[in-house]
Image (cartoon, rainbow, N blue to C red):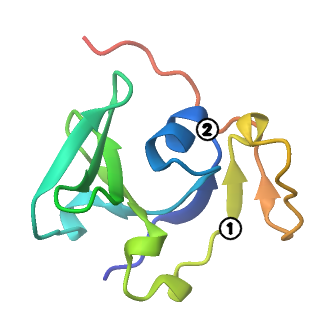
Amino acid sequence: MSEPANVRVCHCRLCQRWTGAPFFARAIFLAETFEWSGETTSAETSPRIVRRSCARCGTPLFACPNDPPARIGVAIATCDDRDALTPTVHIWTSAKVGWLSLDDGLDQDLETYVARPPRS
């Protein structure tokens, strides 16, 4: 496994709905360094993001831009060496569930992603 570009815990509503959990802990890898095996199902959960799950068991695996994917956000819990992928920041904490206390010392961003102009 290559070094991730970043490791974050996302609390946005799209990640919550896709994972069925209060957040999505994921490591971002360059698409050219990432390879998977086995069948996946895909869901376009926003105009720009495709999320892939295991076709056999339904486990959320990774999310990536759909045109073309330069980076891939891999679910940390699905990695063999998941302890080596330590998050550095919580993002989209403006959407986190109210009962979750973030007292782990990581940085927190209310909203990280800036709206992009529409694709041409």
Q: Amino acid at mark 1?
A: Thr
Q: Secondary structure at mark 2?
A: loop
Q: Foreground mark, 2 or 1?
A: 2
The numbered mark, 2 or 1, whose residue comes first in the sequence reads 2
Residue 37 pos. (x, y %): 11, 70
Q: Secondary structure at mark 1?
A: loop
| Residue 98 located left or right of residue 20 | right
Instruction: Confirm or deny contact between disc 2 and disc 1 (CB under 8 A).
Output: no
Residue 12 pos. (x, y %): 61, 38
Residue at the (51%, 42%) spot, across then down: 15
Q: Amino acid at mark 2?
A: Cys
Q: Which residue is mark 1?
A: 88
Question: CA gap, disc 2 to disc 1?
Answer: 17 Å
Residue at the (82%, 53%) spot, across then down: 100
| Quarter of the rendering containing residue 89 | bottom right
Residue 85 pos. (x, y %): 53, 79
| Quarter of the rendering containing residue 49 | top left
**Structural crowding at the residue carrying mark 1, measured as other residues with C-alpha within 10 Å and reported as few (<14), some (14–19) or many (≥20):** some
**Structural crowding at the residue carrying mark 2, measured as other residues with C-alpha within 10 Å and reported as few (<14), some (14–19) or many (≥20):** many
Q: Which residue is mark 2?
A: 12
Residue at the (26%, 49%) spot, across then down: 52
Q: Which label number is shown at residue 104?
A: none
| Residue 1 located left or right of residue 84 | left
| Residue 51 located left or right of residue 22 | left
| Residue 59 located left or right of residue 36 | right
For residue 25, above or below residue 3: above
Q: Residue furthest front?
A: 57
For residue 114, above or below residue 15: above
* Residue in front for this viewpoint, 45 or 29: 45
For residue 100, above or below residue 46: below
* Residue in front for this viewpoint, 3 or 105: 105
Q: Quadrant of the N terminus?
A: bottom left
